[in-house]
Image (tube, rainbow, N blue to C red):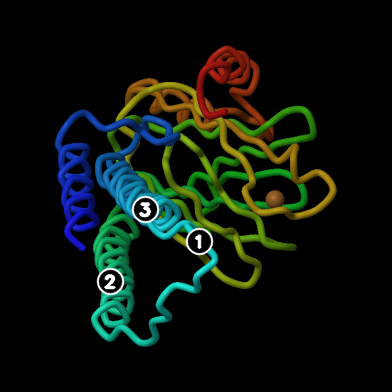
Amino acid sequence: MRRPLRLVGALAVVGIAATACDRPNFGYPDGVTNHTPRLLNIWQGSAIAALVVGVIVWGMILYAVVAFRKRSDVLPRQIRYNLPVEILYTVIPVVIVGAMFFYTARDESKVTKLSAKPDVTVDVIGFRWNWQFKYIDPGAGHTGPNQIEVTGRPGEPAVLVLPQNRSIRFVETSPDVIHSFWVPEFLFKRDVVPGRINQFELTVTKTGTFIGRCAELCGTDHDRMNFYVKVVPQDEYDRFISERQNASVPSTSAGTTTAASTATTATTGSGQ
Ligand SMILES: [Cu+2]
């Protein structure tokens, strides 16, 4: 009985040591928003916890295979009911599920929090099979006349220009089926559901062009439902907005030529 205990103890020490030193991302992108530290932390924590549990389970399987292997044809002593073991394998999963619930609920409530007055509000419309973004006039609200629209077309993805270090509220709706707004670098996605309004808020802290995708299988051209998020400094964003407001004919995909060409080069190393 002592050997497995020692094994478990050693594994726990390894697990704790692994959390203390520089942790790998376990496949997660680096993240570019204000939520990055929190989301990266819960992802790394769950991966390490799962690895520790995995190593303990593999260790116990290996131990059982070696220690209780067939040595002769004599039937070993048959044992039934071991109350301590049964309590252990009931209590440990309850503790694990409780811990997962606690950290998920704690972080989710922080990440999904909406502020009273975001700096920028964007309506996100996911439709079969593209995206439309509407910049909501802060003064006039969602029904204001001067909304700036960006609509993606087949082969010409929509480019959503956003200011760096400003809080952005995304207000999602769908006229047809369920889509999902996903920018891998945001470490976040949210379903776009017909008949309801889904909202979330974040601040992008890094400039750059990031690819966005539909993450909900929504039909024939689902795989082409890509868009770009181009994050620029505030002054560049202001210029983009005033240019669009002054444009006499509202073009559906202004900024696409320059933004999309930047996007193509920027995508190579990111968001895939
Ligand atoms: Cu879709």
* Farthest-out residue, right: 220
In the picture, which quadrant includes the N terminus?
bottom left
The residue lying toward the viewer, choosing from 4 and 172, is: 4
Which residue was labeled with disc 1?
72
Mark 3 = which residue? Answer: 63
Say which residue appears at 64% left-offset and 46% top-offset.
Answer: 214
Which numbered disc, 1 or 2, marks the residue that appears first in the sequence? 1
Q: CA distance from mark 1 to mark 3?
A: 19 Å
Quarter of the picture containing the C terminus is top right
Q: Amino acid at mark 2?
A: Ile
Q: Which residue is mark 2?
A: 92
What residue is at 46 percent from the left and 51 percent from the top?
A: 170
Disc 3 element: helix
Q: Amino acid at mark 3?
A: Tyr
Q: As displayed, is residue 16 above or below residue 78? A: above
Residue drawn at x 33%, y 70% as measured from the top left: 97
Q: Earlier in the sequence, mark 2 or mark 3?
A: 3
